[in-house]
Amino acid sequence: MSTLTEWRVPPANQPRASDYGFDLDRALGSVVGLHALIPPDAFSAETLGTERAGNGVVIDDGLVLTIGYLITEAETVWLHRADGRVVEGHALGFDSETGFGLVQALGRLDIAPLPLGSSAATRIGDRVVVGGAGGRTRSVASQIVAKQEFAGYWEYLLDEAIFTCPAHPNWGGTALLNERGELIGIGSLQLERERDGKAEHVNMNVPIDLLKPILEDLRKFGRVNKPARPWLGLYSTEIDNRVVVIGISANGPAARAELKTGDVILGVDGDKVTSQTAFYKKMWALGAAGVDVPLTVHHEGVTFDVTVTSTDRFKLLKAPKLH
């Protein structure tokens, strides 16, 4: 077990209790530090590492919500309270569609849970707090600057992610709080955008409304109890209205079909695709994991058709030792 790194948010970006109509310190006390250890032979170890650290938010007695990539395939999880006490946890559930992860504390946390708010009710311009473990000095007074679609290179799509600025420097699993002190999202990524000719960092947050329909499934089964989406195991980006493969997951369906970095995905099942969003939606509409996905691919001047047999990405992940 290691201690989390000491650092502070610049004072100008820290939230001030007098600016909010709720008990800021009590709300931020529901955010814990999270440290996870992953076996070196885990499927996600190569891309996400074997030691991961971030934040989590207590949403029920001993139940901690975080961003799933921190705990995927974790064999050991430690939860760090603000007073320095550390409690062991268990990686309880992960949902690849939303990105949420759940941790169950195996000892008493003695931390009041944060109430869940409505992410749908938020508006661009709303003041928010991006809460990190450690209280005000590790939290950011921020603002919602966009609510829009987000397509991730790892076969991931949110219809309406919440983007905030200034960005939190330790964003993974942070608590996004509205002006009532309610949890409206979980921190996932830091991205860069251009504004007035200058680059600035923003955080992408997963809206809390996506958790509500799946929470009980995650608690009971460790995943959502429905057929999984087809997964190909390729990483892509969008360049000039083209979907370009930038990486292939080892031992995944795309690797078995001999797709290569640099391939351009022109179509899915005979339909032209010019964006990651169109690519993902067309692929997922074909059926559940295991379905054949016909692709039209362009590589080094040659266009060809190839059928990739999709899979359930969970089959490649190490399962938790207990549930």
Image (tube, grey):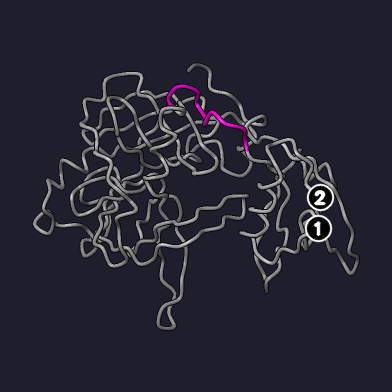
| Left or right placement of residue 308 versus residue 319 in this view | right
Q: Quick check: 8 above or below 105?
A: below
Q: Viewer-proximal residue, 1 or 175?
A: 175
Classify residue 202 by image quadrant: bottom left
Residue labelled with disc 1: 270
269 in the magenta segment: no
Tell me if label 1 and label 2 are in contact, CB under 8 Å.
yes
Task: Give the crowd class for mark 1: few <14, some 14-19, many >=20 residues within 10 Å.
Answer: few
Q: Position of residue 234 (x, y in %)?
A: 71, 49
All told, the count of numbered labels is 2
Distance from Cα at disc 1 to Cα at disc 2: 8 Å
Residue labelled with disc 2: 294
Q: Viewer-proximal residue, 158 or 175?
A: 158
Task: Give the crowd class for mark 2: few <14, some 14-19, many >=20 residues within 10 Å.
Answer: some
- Of the residues shown, which amino acid type is indicated by label 2? Pro
- Residue at left offset 26%, top offset 28%: 85
| Left or right placement of residue 174 versus residue 283 in this view | left
| Left or right placement of residue 65 versus residue 140 in this view | right
Q: Residue furthest bottom?
A: 197
- Of the residues shown, which amino acid type is indicated by label 1? Gly
Q: Over which residues does the magenta segment extend?
A: 219-228
Q: Position of residue 187 (x, y in %)?
A: 39, 50
Q: Position of residue 25 (x, y in %)?
A: 15, 44
- Residue at left offset 83%, top offset 58%: 296
